[in-house]
Amino acid sequence: MMSNSDLMNRRLNAIPRGVANASGIFAVRALNAEVWDVEGRRYIDFVGGIAVLNTGHNHPRIIEAVEAQLKAFHHTCFQVLPYEPYVALAETLNKRAPFTGPAKTIFFNTGAEAVENAVKIARAATGRSGVIAFSGAFHGRTLMTSALTGKVTPYKKQFGIMPSEVWHVPFPVEHYGVTVEDSLKALETLFRADVDPSRIAAMIIEPVQGEGGFHVTPPDLLKALRQLCDTHGIKLIIDEVQTGFGRTGKMFAIEHAGVEPDLITMAKSMSGGFPLSGVLGRADIMDAVDPGGLGSTFGGSPLSCAAALAVQQVIADEDLLAKSEALGARMRAKFAAWAGRKDLLPIANIRGLGAMMAFDLVKVRGGNEPDGEATKRVTAKALELGLIQISCGIYGETLRFLMPLTIPATVFDEGMAILEQALKA
């Protein structure tokens, strides 16, 4: 029988250390919110492949759809021989676009590819090249998306000069001492000191920061960005790679703010675990690129499109948007109760939208000084007890929650009980 330690030794010998592992367990089977490793041990999954499995592991309707497509054909390259699932998925998403007017969608493979292509589309539509992003943001690990990402280590360290004409402004986080007014003042200073707004093609922002710490973008900032973009002819890109497809209680998290974007990047839970990403945008902007300027050999794979169409059906039929809201409310209540207990590690800054929830571990009860080391200990202890849980945040202080929206109540309660044990002071 294979063991986790044997497989880790093989992994260390065969795979570069640049790709890190949050745990030393190797999965062999999974169902909904439960995973079994190669040694037969069961774990509860509060990570969902980092927001990929809103519909859970191995949802039967998604597996059925993929199996049916696999029996028909599994690849032609859409640019060579197009196929109906790609068209049907684009039509479905266009109808769900959180903006007025006609929409169009194109598909790729990864979130980073979606972001790269959204920037390309914005540049083609405006004839400009500059992009503004925010501190703490995560947009990917390719060179362009690393430049957009607002964190040096590990995403920019060692990789030399980043692509030019990318500027960052502070993201507002109250307990870091940064307000919406500070962010807007920094933008004003940027336009006066570094770059004229007539050179900016796009601004890109996550409606809830992912790797940066699950900080919800204040609606006032999003509304101000929309107004600035309209004033200066800049395209507003909303990065929904982690927040989309029901995670926050809406199909797209930007719907909470009532702000209409120009372009949306999508991936992760879009296809229930099959590689797929996309850019959804206003039709006139999407059509700014000449034929051949966009594309991908594997982008919009027939299997992934079939899976994504099934995901849309599951979201609707199982009312996952309402389930996300209910799941988030249960977490918020539990975390608030934990924050008042002296037998648990100090908890602060409970936050989130829908089931995209988080809290920080801090050094002093009632304070805000982050305790990243305590967070590492908690995730390690949780894994030891049978719960898969990961962290994020600028200082690694944040515990984030991305369990499947389909998680059974009994499994959710079991996982929360394990985490409570891990939080014991």
Image (tube, rainbow, N blue to C red):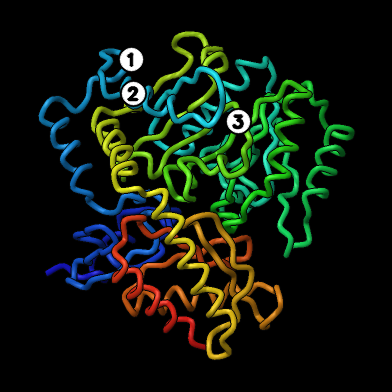
- What is the tally of numbered marks visible in this picture? 3
Mark 2: give few (<14), some (14-19) or many (20+) Cα within 10 Å: some
- Pick whichever of labels 1 and 3 is earlier in the sequence: 1
Residue 36, given in percent of the width and then of the height, sits at: 22, 66
Q: Which residue is mark 3?
A: 261
Q: To which residue does mark 1 refer?
A: 79
Mark 3 Cα-neighbour bin, 10 Å: few <14, some 14–19, many ≥20: many
Q: Amino acid at mark 2?
A: Thr
* Amino acid under disc 1: Gln
Residue depicted at 56% across the width and 58% down the height: 352
Relative placement, left or right, of 156 versus 14 is right
Q: Which residue is mark 2?
A: 297
Q: Is residue 375 above or below residue 188?
A: below
Residue drawn at x 75%, y 31% as measured from the top left: 227
Q: Position of residue 31 (x, y in %)?
A: 22, 58
**What residue is shown at x 23% (from left), y 71% (from top)?**
42
Contact (CB < 8 A) between labels 2 and 1?
yes
